[in-house]
Amino acid sequence: MTATPSQPYTPFVPCAQELPRHRAGFAPARSTRPRGVARDLLTLVLLPLPLLALTLPAAFAGGGTRRWFGGRSESQRAEAQAAKDAAAAAFYELDTAQRDLRISIETITAVDGSPAARRAVSDFDALGRRIDEVSHVYINAVDAHDLDRDDLEASVAAQARTELTKAKDDLGRVKQELDRFAEGLGPLLGKAETQLARLAPAVERARQALLAASNALDAVRGSGLKADDLAARLAALGPELTRLNQGAGQHGVPETLERADRVARDAEAVRAEAERLPERAAEIDRRLVSLRTRAQALTTRSGQVEPVLSELRRRFTVACWQDLQHVPDQAAETVRQAEQKLTEARSARDEQRWPDATSLLSTVRALLNTTDEAVSAAGDRLRRLNEVSKDPQQEIDRTRFAIRDAQRLAMAGRSTPDPRHALPLDDSVARLERAIGTLEGRHPDYWHFLTETEAVRRTVARVVAQIREERGAGA
């Protein structure tokens, strides 16, 4: 509630008097001259022109029509009028400040629903009630005294001055309370104004993002691609655009900001995918060709596994090739599955089911990788067994070098090695010696020898990593 009284005071009087409407939005009522003054003016008009010229300055001296006699009464009247003017100014300042502050409160409540914002509204309402009280006191003081009466007594003028001065002081004190309250609203008001400043740009960004997504989708469809999934995603944003157009007044500022950001983000994703769709289709086409070529090559390579196994069986012990027996059949089955998935991927591509096509191609690639590893394992096995059978000393020296290097690191800066490091290294030495022993005899198990030396090197590498980690932490 502003300081404006609910109903203006308009008493019925026999002659026109000044009505106390000292409020923002109301011009002070013009006081009407008494009948005596009218008769005086009529007399002046009827006087001869020279006498009229002499009489007018005296009649209108001071800009008023009041008779200038009465002495002390006129002095009291002037002081009361000054008090009335000062109270009116204070009342206007308070009313203006309250109106401005109400706008700030409405700004905060439109954006912020926090307990602090609700408390600010409650405190403002309490201040409003206090403003109403002092405003009524002021209005009553103005209405109670007609300072333009010719027969105004000095005591009445003095009482009017006292009441109006007190009303002005009360209005000033409440104005100070209002100013302090307004200063305390600074953080809340700043936050609210920031959000309101973001509102229009955020909504506009959402609209522009939707427009860009729609244009990109139209361009893709014009190139012969359907993009039905993207069209469905864009259509789902239609209701959100409707809510944005309804405005923050209906849905709230925070909700509208969040909705605008979400719509802009989703629309931008649709636009980016639509613009990338021709390239995605071309990439799927390339992958289809490449994977089919690779499947055909693996079919040829898998046919070479059987001769490799035959040589392994002929030259080496069972342990050297037994785990590879299933490779030819497994490779043929895996290639068959890959070719079936490629056919499904081609169908998905033709139907423009892009996610399905991409997923199927990933499956084909995994199947071919597995087949490639199995086919390569047979050839790699034969190569390594050939090398170690001709000269096992190279593998032995390589492993011993790794052990000695780890032992030197374990003894660096120490007189005795740490048991946590020494024991695994000692076990590695013994394990290597046992592996070397398997090479003796008529039919050495070269594959067991190779797997043991690899295991020893892995153990030594773990010890080295542990030593370096501990010394790095203690540095």
Image (tube, rainbow, N blue to C red):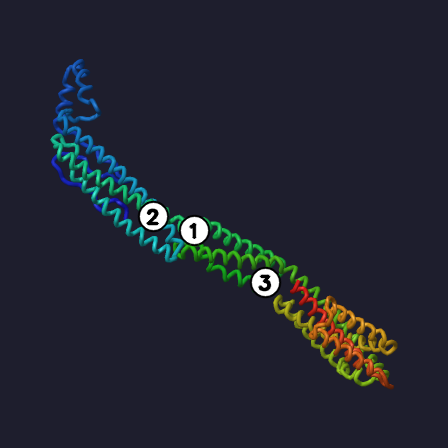
Circle 3: residue type = Ala
Q: Earlier in the sequence, mark 2 or mark 1?
A: 2
Q: Does the CB distance between marks 2 and 3 fall below 8 Å?
A: no
- Residue in the picture at 71% in, 64% down: 286
How far apart, in angstroms, are the residues tagged by discs 3 and 1? 42 Å
> Nearer the viewer's eye, disc 2 or disc 3?
2
Q: Position of residue 294 (x, y in %)?
A: 75, 70
Q: Does the CB distance between marks 3 and 1 fall below 8 Å?
A: no
Q: Nearer the viewer, residue 125 or 204?
A: 125
Circle 2: residue type = Phe
Q: What residue does disc 1 label?
A: 191
Q: Residues within 10 Å of mark 1 (few under 14, many from 20)?
A: some
Q: Earlier in the sequence, mark 2 or mark 3?
A: 2
How far apart, in angstroms, are the residues tagged by discs 2 and 3? 58 Å
Side of 327 where 128 appears, left or right: left
Q: What residue does disc 2 label?
A: 181
Q: Nearer the viewer, residue 176 or 466?
A: 466
Circle 1: residue type = Lys
Above or below residue 2? Residue 444 is below
- Residue 400: mark in rendering: none
Q: Position of residue 362 (x, y in %)?
A: 66, 70
Q: What residue does disc 3 label?
A: 227
- Residue in the picture at 85% in, 85% down: 443
Side of 17 where 188 appears, left or right: right
How far apart, in angstroms, are the residues tagged by discs 2 and 1? 17 Å
Helix, strand, or loop for circle 3? Answer: loop
- Residue in the picture at 43% in, 51% down: 191
Picture quadrant where residue 268 is located? bottom right
**How many numbered discs?**
3
